[in-house]
Amino acid sequence: MVIDVRDVHFAIGGRSIFQGVNLTARRGRITAIMGPSGTGKTTLLRLITAQIAADRGQVLAFGSDVATLGTKQVYALRRRMGMLFQNGALLTDLDVFENVAFPVREHTDLPEPLIRKLVLTKLQAVGLRGAAELMPGELSGGMARRVALARAIVMDPEVLIYDEPFVGLDPISLGMILRLVKRMNEALGITSLIVSHDVQEVSSIADDSYLLSGGRVAAAGSPAQLRDSDSPAVRQFMTGGAEGPVAFHYPAPDYLAQLLGDV
Amino acid sequence: MSNGSAVRLEGVRRLGATAIFLVRLVAASVPALARPRLIVNQIYNAGARSLIIIMLSGLFVGMVLGLQGFQLLQRFGSEDVLGSAAALGLLKELGPVITALLFAGRAGTALTSEIGLMRATDQLTAMQIMAVDPMRYVAAPRFLGGVIAMPLLAAIFGLIGLFGAQLIGVQLMGVDSGVFWSQTQDSVRLRDVTEGIVKSVVFGIACSLIAVYEGYNAERTAAGVGLATTRTVVASSVLTLLLDYVLTAAFL
């Protein structure tokens, strides 16, 4: 078990986000965390990467409770993780090559020729060796995300965390990212944690999946098990149905009364 | 709680937060010194790129000083001291103060919006996840760059300003060139130079601190970054003028 979230409670500004979330990411597998927008998926990633601390419960990464670690230990922990941000979060004042080289330069004293080879092999892995000289502003959304992926794997992390990796991509870029995620997992044996609400895409590659809803894990299992769930809420989310416990309409006063009334 | 006391409380909170930020910034500046390339880049950004506006403004301020000073001193028949009036005015007051105001508008806003956008686009968070401290990599080099650039800019401003005053006073109004320069040389003491340098260093710390703080703590929206940029200009300008009074009084 690489990541183990145990009975986590968390609230922001009095609003409860999690009430007892339990989930685990097992070594060498792809774990998907799904759920509707606003269920705190990104908050969960912030808890796992020790950016914030849980109110109650524990988050264990590589066996140690992240809340008890000091700054140095947190940084040591993060060097074993790679994270892909939704928008790539490339450093806009560095070109593609330097972006990928950034963690290497910061954390090692490798000689320049070695850094060059390392960065070029990672860029080759995401198919963007030819784009090494471009600035982040010149990249499309899909390319930026692939560069960010190259940067996330350049230090050979044990865990890769993806925050909504499939949002806003055209079908070709989407297919590329999907295959890359799968390949990183198979070829490099990287444990992967994917947070996403793109059910179809993430179901096609995940080994284990969790469905977050209302501050808890509503369902857990393989993607196939979740699809065949007899819970109406789980089925509605997995199939994207309009009918189900989650209503299309935000709570509002009576429609007819509001139209006919003065207010 | 009444609205007034809530505003005052918020003001005190921001003051405290800025002070804590300054301590963190100074702590991060020590290891940042080991990466001189980053600091040099920021001196270029904040300093070299502000040169044109500083030099142009210095020239015009000096010319106005020459014109006004000449008119005023002529009334008392003492236009010969124009040189010392211009030199002391530029060295002790106008140089550091106007440079700081221009710095806040040119370099401070650029710093705030750059760091604010880095925050908004997750670049700072991404650094933290890559186990790189953004205080050390982003904030401290920009702060140090501003602190180093400010006295240099103020010196250039003063120099060009004196040239502008001479241009009007000597070339146009006919003050004797030898008198102008010897008056300048006689009246400026080391203490006056020190005052100018101390002022510009203090203004450099204040303006760079505000610019970096506002950017680092900007809300992650377009409106948030805009607001932070405005705050940088307003707070830097007011604080510069306030500190100027305090320092002037201290040097008397």
Image (cartoon, helix red, strand yellow):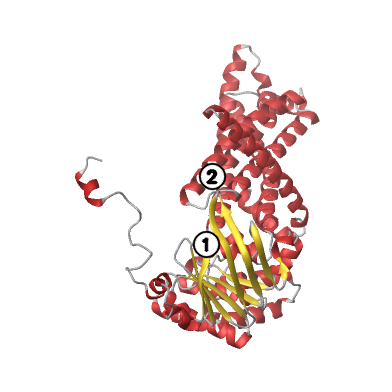
Please name the residue that numbered disc 2 is placed on.
Answer: B228
Q: Residue at x 76, y 26 (%)?
A: B251
Residue B127 appears anywhere in the view: yes
**Which residue, as the protein is rendered here, is positioned at the far right?**
B190
Tell me the tag on residue A215.
Answer: 1
Which type of secondary structure does the marked residue at label 2 adopt? helix
Residue A77 located left or right of residue A21: right
**Which residue, as the protein is rendered here, is positioned at the far front?**
A230
Q: Residue at x 51, y 48 (%)?
A: B225
**Which residue, as the protein is rendered here, is positioned at the far top?**
B76
Q: Which residue occupies the foreground of this view, B28 or B147?
A: B28
Which type of secondary structure does the marked residue at label 1 adopt? loop
Q: What is the x, y in percent for residue A95?
A: 57, 69
Q: Residue at x 55, y 60 (%)?
A: A18
Chain under callout 1: A
Residue A45 versus residue A204 in the image, above or below: above
Residue A97 appears anywhere in the view: no
Q: Amino acid at mark 2?
A: Ala
Q: Amino acid at mark 1?
A: Gly
